[in-house]
Amino acid sequence: MSTQKLTTSRLANLGAEAVCEAFESLQRQFHSTTARARQRFETRDWAGLQADAAERLSLYTKVVNHVVARIRELLENRWEDLLVWVGMKAVYSGLIENRDDWELAETFFNSVTRRIFTTVGVNPQIEFVDTDYELPPTAARSRLIRSYSWAVSATLLLREIFNDLEWDAPFENLERDLERVADRIDRVLEEFNLAGKVKRAEIISSIFYRGREAYLVGRLFCGGRTLPLALAFLHKPEGIVVDAVLLTENDVSLLFSFTRSYFLVDTQRPYDMVAFLKSIMPRKRRAELYISMGLNKHGKTELYRDLLHHLEKTQNRFEVARGERGMVMAVFTMPDYDVVIKIIKDHFAYPKNTTRKEVMSKYHLIFKHDRVGRLVDAQEFEFLEFQRRHFSESLLRELLDDAGQTVTVKGDSVVIKHAYLERRLTPLNLFLTEAPPAEAAQAVIDCGHTIKDLMTANIFAGDILLKNFGVTRQGRVVFYDYDEVCLLTDCRFRAIPPARYDDDDVAAEPWFSVQENDVFPEEFENFFKLRPDLHRVFCQHHSDLFTVSLWKQAQERIQAGELVHLLPYREENRLG
């Protein structure tokens, strides 16, 4: 029947049902892909697990594209009728009120409306600006945690926990691992003066899978104190082993870092999962925890809400982020909020010869790729709207001059058509001038490890300048400037040919031909511009980075099918 013959309320019902069905389809596919992680781990199918993780990243966009086309077909010439969508939102809210994943369903509806209307800022008439539910609208229908009373010893408690694992694969040596884990827990409890004070343990029923590892995550109740607990499992050819025990907030936070790829973990009721995880990692935003579980679309919603709530309370203004100005990105931040907003400039300074489209493709490459703990997760946003009072006039002039195609001012509002939001870090070049000598030396060493870790993951950073690396609050060096990144296997690593004449070395142009993907590792030493003491430290540990052979060997390993396996915890947390 033509939409002309249907009432607004009828169209609203039809549209809401179509969006709800699409969301249900998305969740079925998401959970089905996630559920395969257990069998992949049991059978050591690492390539399959990696493929599932990549497949899951593309599900959301595919389903949104499909339902947008369906809505246009269903509503015909009224598919942009605001009154219909106001009604759709009301009907949809009722349809999802009994779901365990209602907050994800709200975000999905927002994604559809923003695609239809290209909404600037937010529109509370047709979007869930804040969730409709201050408290969970439903009681949990599945068990999030298993609770275990403290027995006579840590070994007996662990045996009970391990009995519930139900993996269809044997342990290499279960008794050995039980003893090792119990001994590590006992020693840490003694260090914290908590020996004999543990009352019970709570373990999340779902197992977290990523790469070649599986994790049990929970907490120990020790009198009036709670300790996080995470056990890392590897499946070796000889069987499953416990590889590490993590018992501090910092160590568990590393597992859920914004520099890591997303977990595959069953999240039937994500609200409760995030609440539990936040209880053991209180410094992490809810947004970051949602994102870590692969729920990055809702994580973006949480991040934007969090930023808006912060702006309502602060008296500060946005300011240019610390560090050297970039040739490709304009970067600004709020001094009391640890996130930066990155905007692609309209024009790039020489010698940059890339395009906006190419820069965006680089960021998309990193989004899909294994970040191995060395690449910052960048969340992409469109049509953000802020109050003009949050910008200084000098910053606003700079943004309009550098990115006037992306940033516009409309009365009291500043609209940003496209941006990336990332965690704010201390640029490495600044860190090295401000940190004590020992910390600066350690950061320089870790910078070399960052480059080598990325090499292992088939990523070449491109611009390996100090300003493009950052230091996290835990002192870890990561990379965050992606406009020159590429796959390592796409590069051609070459040695610089011998000079033909005495003055070739000082000539303005090279005396040899250079192709687009040619890379000369000998030049890297000049890029860092380290002060003499730090240059010596770097060369002591990483002089091989200046050799062609190291890079070609890495390419050969990747081309031979070697999969990356970089563990997301410190060596001292490992057993054995």
Image (spheres, grey):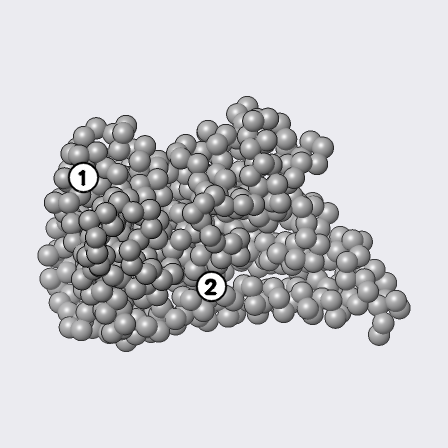
At 52% from the left and 25% from the top, the residue drawn is 316
Observer-side mark, 1 or 2, equals 1
Residue 519 percent location from the top left of the image = 30, 58
Q: Residues within 10 Å of mark 2 (few under 14, many from 20)?
A: some
Q: Is residue 39 above or below residue 493?
A: below
At 28% from the left and 76% from the top, the residue drawn is 43
Q: Is residue 195 above or below residue 452?
A: above
Q: Residues within 10 Å of mark 1 (few under 14, many from 20)?
A: some
- Amino acid type indicated by mark 1: His
Residue 253 left/right relative to 81:
left
Please name the residue that numbered disc 2 is placed on: 57
At 40% from the left and 53% from the top, the residue drawn is 484
- Amino acid type indicated by mark 2: Leu
Residue 4 percent location from the top left of the image = 88, 67
| Residue 310 visible | yes
Please name the residue that numbered disc 1 is placed on: 535
Q: Are marks 1 and 2 in contact (CB under 8 Å)?
A: no
Residue 204 percent location from the top left of the image = 35, 56
Tell me the quarter of the image containing the N terminus: bottom right
- First of labels 1, 2 by sequence position: 2
Tell me the quarter of the image containing the C terminus: bottom left
In the drawing, what numbered circle is on residue 462? none
Question: Viewer-proximal residue, 443 or 505?
Answer: 505
Question: Viewer-proximal residue, 339 or 7?
Answer: 339
**SS state under label 2:** helix
Question: Viewer-proximal residue, 347 or 166?
Answer: 347
* Distance of label 1 from label 2 (alpha carbons): 40 Å
Residue 147 left/right relative to 498:
right
Residue 87 left/right relative to 320:
right
Rendering quarter of residue 459: bottom left
Q: Residue furthest right?
A: 5
**SS state under label 1:** helix
